[in-house]
Every structure is written in structure tokens, then in C-alpha cells.
Amino acid sequence: MPKKSTDDRADLIAALGGELRQFATATVLVNQAIADRLGMHATDHRCLELLARAGRMTAGELAEVTGLTTGAITGVIDRLEKAGFVQRVKDPEDRRRVVIEPFPERIEQEIAPLFKSLAPAMVELCAGYSAHDLAVIRDFIAGIQRVAYEQIRTLRDTGGGAKPNKDSRPAASE
């Protein structure tokens, strides 16, 4: 009898993996649709999200986090600045550095309405789960994020395989 339980667990884990891949794809497509509505590249939208969460970053820090080249990041920042979402300012702690600061009010004004229908849908979805279930789901998603960031570090580490050369790295418009 324990064999059946083990098989059920393995099947469930496999199914969960499939659902997670589909969720990742759906997330990419939602973000692309939002970027399309904003008239920007999907990469620009994701970089804006990173800047909004961080509050401010240097171009080099943003390049490091995203894995994009510094040249690609310069293009992203130029477009975001032109659209009025960010500004380049001298770092008050080190005037030799320039930091990229997002405009939270502009982000809220332009992007938040695009998520308006998502909030009630999420509330409705969550209504079917107990507080305990939601805590487990939250912890699981936090674990997925940790695993994803560990995977990113592994993939970018020189020991994790061949690193792309400068010409094969993704550009901001991809």
C-alpha cells in the first residue's frame, strides 16, 4: 500500500511541475499584454517593476539583476525616462554615481489600472481556501521564488555552463 502513496505523490509533484510551467508562461504573457498596453517592450516593463520594488538602482545594478548588457540597460533606461517613469539622478551618497529612480505616482497612475480586474479575481480565487491553505500556498510560492533565484545564480555562474558571449546575450527589445 505505501507504494501507491509514493506513486500518488510522484504523480502530484509531476503535475505540479507542469502547472508551474504553465503558470510561468501565463505570467510572461500577462506581462507582455501589459507592456503592449503601455506601448513598451516587455523587458522595459520588467525592469520598471524591478526599479519600482527596489526604489532606486544604478544602471550597473539593474544590468546585474537582469543579466542584460549595460548597453541594453542604457536603452531600457532611456525609453523609461522618455516615457516619464524614471529619472537619472546623482547619487546623494556618491555624486560620481548616477542612480535610476522610479516615479511611483506615475507607475501607480499608468500601470495599476491595468491590474484592476486582477485583484477581485484573486480575492474570488482565494475565497475557496482556508487561512491555513493560503499560508501554505504563500510559503510554497516564496519557496519557488527562492529556488528560481538560486537557479538564476547557478545559470549565471561560470561553473554552471557556458556563458553567452556579448553578441548572444538578449537585447532589451527581445
Image (cartoon, rainbow, N blue to C red):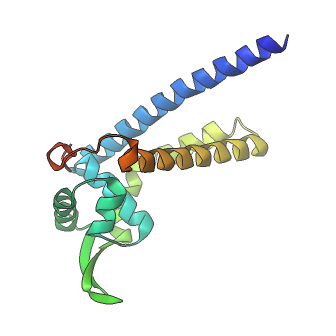
Query: Residue 3, image x and y in percent?
Result: 79, 12
In the picture, measured across the screen, residue 82 lies left or right of residue 145, that is left
Pick the residue in front: 100 or 45: 100
Task: Using the image, determine if residue 13 lies above or below residue 99.
Answer: above
Task: Using the image, determine if residue 97 lies above or below residue 109.
Answer: below
Image quarter for residue 88? bottom left
Pick the residue in front: 56 or 84: 56
Task: Using the image, determine if residue 12 lies above or below residue 89.
Answer: above
Q: Residue at x 47, y 44 (%)?
A: 151
Q: Residue at x 52, y 24 (%)?
A: 18
Query: Residue 62, image x and y in percent?
Result: 32, 63
Pick the residue in front: 131 or 73: 73
Query: Residue 14, image x and y in percent?
Result: 59, 22
Query: Residue 165, image x and y in percent?
Result: 19, 46
Q: Residue at x 41, y 56 (%)?
A: 112
Camera sees residue 110: no
Which quadrant, please, contains the C terminus? top left
Pick the residue in front: 35 or 148: 148
Q: What is the tally of numbered marks visible in this picture?
A: 0
In the picture, measured across the screen, residue 15 lies left or right of residue 10, that is left
The extreme front residue here reads 159
Which quadrant, please, contains the N terminus? top right
Camera sees residue 13: yes
